[in-house]
Amino acid sequence: MNKRVKDTVLGTVVYGVIAIIVSAILNGGEPSWTLAIGMAIAGFLSYAFIYPALDKRKRKQV
C-alpha cells in the first residue's frame, strides 16, 4: 500500500474512534453512532482528497 492509502485508512479510523469517545463522554455513556459514521466519512474525504490536493498545490507553489 502506498502512503496515501495508509493515511486514508488511518484517518478514517482515528476520526471515527475520536467521535465515539467524545460522544460517549458527552452523552453519558451512549455514543452517537450517526456522529461517529459522519466523522469517519469526513476523515476519509479529508485524507483521500482534500489533504493530497492541498499538498500538491503547496508543492506547486514552492
Image (cartoon, rainbow, N blue to C red):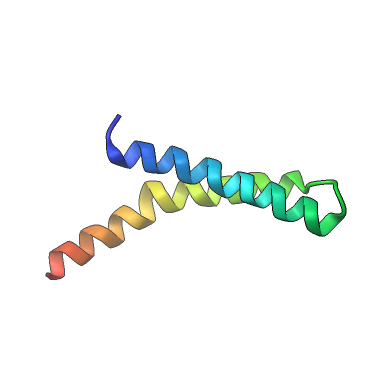
Quarter of the image containing the C terminus? bottom left
Question: How many numbered badges does the structure rendering display?
Answer: 0
20 or 51: which is nearer to us? 20
Location of residue 5 in the rendering, given as x and y in whole percent from the top left corner: 35, 37
Instruction: Tell me the quarter of the image containing the N terminus.
Output: top left
Taking 25 as reference, is 2 above or below it?
A: above
Name the residue nearer the viewer: 24 or 41.
24
Q: Position of residue 30 (x, y in %)?
A: 85, 46
Residue drawn 74% across and 44% down?
A: 33
Residue at the outermost right position: 28
Name the residue: 27% across, 34% down. 2
Pinpoint residue 6: horizontal percent, then vertical percent: 37, 37
Give above or below for 57 relative to 33. Answer: below
Residue 42 appears left or right of 27: left
Q: Residue furthest bottom?
A: 61
In the displayed structure image, the side of residue 56 where residue 24 appears, left or right: right
Residue at horizontal 50%, vertical 50%?
A: 43
8 on left or right of 55: right
Q: Is residue 5 above or below residue 56?
A: above
Residue at 60 percent of width and 51 percent of height: 39
Where is residue 29? Give x, y as percent. Answer: 85, 48
Image side of residue 48 versus residue 12, left or right: left
